[in-house]
Amino acid sequence: MARQSSLTIKDHLRETHLFQKRVLFAVIVAVAVLVLIIARLIYLQIINHDHYTTLSEENRINILPIPPIRGLIYDRNGVLLAQNLPSFTLQLIPEHIRDLDDTLQQLKALIDVSDEEIARFHELRKTKRRFEGVPLRFRLNDVERAKVAVHQDRLPGVNVTAELTRDYPQGKLASHAIGYVGRINEIELTRLDATRYSATKHIGKVGVERSYEDILHGEVGFERVETNSQGRIMNKVPELLPIPGKDLYMTIDINVQKIAEQAFGEDNGALVAIDPQDGSVIAFVSMPTYDPNIFVNGVDRETYRALSQSPQRPLFNRALQGQYPPGSTLKPFIGLAGLEDKIIGSDEKIKCPGYYMLKNDERKYRDWKKEGHGETNLTKAIVESCDVYFYDLSLALKIDRIEAYLARFGLGETTGIDIRGEQEGLLPSREWKRKTYNLPWFPGETLITGIGQGFTLTTPLQLAHITATLGTQGERYKPRIVHAIGEPGIEEISVTSPNHIGTVQKSNPENWNIIIRAMTRVVHSIYGTARSINPGIQYKVAGKTGTAQVFGIKEDEEYDEEKIAKKLRDHALFISYAPVDEPRIAVAVIVENGGSGGAIAAPIARKVMDAYLLKDK
Amino acid sequence: MAFARSEFADTTRLSGGRRYIRGLHIDLPLLLSLLLLAGIGLVVLYSASEQSNDVVIKQLIRLTIAFGIMFAVAQLSPDTIEHWSPWLFGVGLVMLVAVLLLGEVGKGAKRWLDLGLFTFQPSELMKLALPMIIAWYLSDTTLPPRFSRIIISLALILLPTFLVARQPDLGTAILLAGSGIFVLFLAGLRWRFIITSFILLIPLSWVLWQYGMHDYQRKRVLTFLNPESDPLGSGYHIIQSTIAIGSGGLYGKGWLNGTQSHLDFLPERKTDFIFPVFSEEFGLLGSILLLAVYALIIARGLIIASQAQDTYTRLLAGSITLTFFLYVFINIGMVSGLLPVVGVPLPLVSYGGTSMVTLMAGFGILMSIQTHRKLIAS
């Protein structure tokens, strides 16, 4: 050890010699390895050549996937909402075409092929082999098919193939609920089961088509395909038949849906109608709507731009994602909170002078009725929609109790409907305000929360849900839009049971009856804000009108509908359920910039209730 | 004037192409065989990519960059390279740790580090930094290395190897371990040590199998042992590639005529499984020719190592060359069914740029070592 460590001059000669011995050894190993590899190659390529040639030939039997047929979608009465139709694709097989440009020119003259389609054809051609068909035009119509068929003899290598493609026979009706399928894009490709989707070209993009993609899709099948040495298909033998997707039965009644959509006329807005007894969605309207058929095989850029950039926002699902201030439609629930928490008695009266003022605050909180409602109890406050009464009540309740009570109905959270993308609205609280704005809660904010303004936001779906809950005296059912799944080839359909998600705690059922009676008078009494729908009505309705401010009005300013541009007018709201004694339908309507809830929104709800309740008469 | 004359006299003495190339620090035999290999690579790639000009041009651009890097590295003097060794290793190690903590995930493994402008694979840097640090560390004292030095060297090898294996990237981990062990071996590691290690390796590999491997890695070893057990899963690669090679025969099916590869039976045929494409189309004769080109490069590398003037350059040049050989052996070994599938590309032939840059930088070091020799010593 001592000798080694004291040695500072390296023995170069010895080291070089050692190194070269090691290199020599490495060379010997390397040569041995090379010999081993060559021996292996000789074993594979000479000795077993025939064996592997045979295997190589056998390889030409390939397994190809067969797409399953997508499940159909029906409404609650069995009316077809989504089906699969044969679609005809014009394709060219380059191998069979002597002069491609000439053929394309002929086709251009024959069926008016656009330059864009030709460019896409050339792009697609690069990815295919010469014997494979390259599509030139999708969805040929009958005339085009006939033209191609007549000139088939002059157009070798041109043929028309049929494949099933999604079709929505109801067109624009209920498109926000049904949704649509489109071509699978690259992002979807990465998350999909590659085997299961190996033959599938379309996938549900929005609506029920997307939420129930798994059930609608079915299972892929396989066939054994024999190819020759160039890969051309010689023979096909099915190995495993695909299993078609299951059919869906939606809870939507397409007739009611149609009447609801027509009732909106040119207006934008949303309507959700729910069966309070089980949460089934009877109508699911978001206006304006769009034709889902254009998305199936790729929408052209211009159409898409027109749709997506339209100020009307037809692609926006207002019923599911639109978040609106509930306005006065919240008042029955605030009133109920006051009764249940024993803040007020049903006969206690306050005097409404047309405005309300907080202590130590100069600001006047206005009532919609400038001259005031005079002596007002709870029932009158709901029937005439007195703001001052609810300012006073809210202040007594405080924001914490308001928030806690409304949360019991499910505001501030998604209802859990079986369509993706639902918004949760907003139920403000002290905690929320501190987190969001880093500010304390002010009493003035409690006042306007009590009349459904301020921070509070609800979706039309939530409004319909809480209205339905009122109708069932607190029994909450998760809204659903699909209620049955049909097994392919079997008549029997499996019905999914309603999902009871809880009961709103009651301290005295009579409190609920007081609110419901008041809401009945909203429609059926001569003072009611929705009395306009009373004439000729054949059942009893509990309802509440509302308007949601789109922009703020200064306290000394007058809201004058005539002077305000349409897009700045208040949203008109109406919630209702009927029949009062045995609720079968709960409706929430929002007409954007509609102005008056009683005059604009309530008649739409009436038409929907008529259509549903009186359909057998 | 006198100065100018002597300069003139000097250049006349150094006349001839070789001297000129040497002035540029280029080793002509190595350059020519690398160019030949790259050329063969492009020809196979054209076939393997279904005659895609796009792919070939991309690869050509990568090759150009990689050759440029080789020339650049060749300009550095071996002293500079030696001086950098510990720093490079340190940076590489930090980056490997970083990649485990916050690396980009690709194909289920964390290998890339996002540096904002570009992504970087630190394990590639380590492929050069590891043999450099071991050679730097061992060249400090007399060889063969003492026991304590061997242990420290082994620790230096195992640390990055372990980090890379955790990514998980078994192929690179093997290459890394190999590059370090080659230095130790060339430094004159005693035979009894080597043999003892091999004996100890047996229980160690059992432990590794039990606790150190991912399921997919175990599955690969199992399917290597019996490919037929999983003909549609991971055994598929090996079966299809042996069929491709075997059906090629003595002369091959001819360029662009390989049915296995063109009918989509052969997976990863542009990258790790490009040798079967070549072997199917050019047969046994072509394969032997390709192996000969590799042998030429390796032979030249070992000559450069043998002629190197000091311990550091000698060990480094030897290790770089042997690691290159390890690449070739593992790749061809795995596609022909001699070794399990571990994901090592065929150098300069497989499509892709990450490992190519490291390989060519390595050859740059070889050229630097060969062309910076001081005349007196030889």
Image: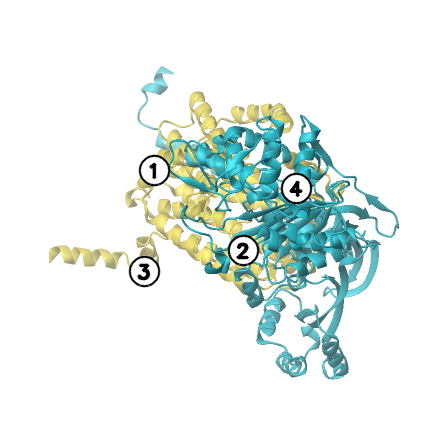
Chain colours: A cyan, B yellow
Residue furthest top as drawn: A2
Residue furthest right as drawn: A491
Q: Which residue is mark 4?
A: A519
Q: Earlier in the sequence, mark 3 or mark 1?
A: 3
Q: Which residue is mark 3?
A: B16
Q: Which residue type carries mark 2?
A: Asn
Q: Are marks 2 and 3 on the same chain?
A: no
Position in image of residue B66 (x %, y %): 43, 52
Quadrant assignment for the C terminus of chain A: bottom right
Nearest-to-viewer mark from 2 and 3: 2
Depicted A144 relative to depicted A278: above or below: below
Disc 4/disc 2 C-alpha distance (Å)? 24 Å
**Badges 2 and 1: C-beta atoms under 8 Å apart?**
no
| Tag 1 secondary structure | helix
Q: Earlier in the sequence, mark 4 or mark 2?
A: 4
Q: Residues within 10 Å of mark 4 (few under 14, many from 20)?
A: many
Q: Which residue type carries mark 1?
A: Trp
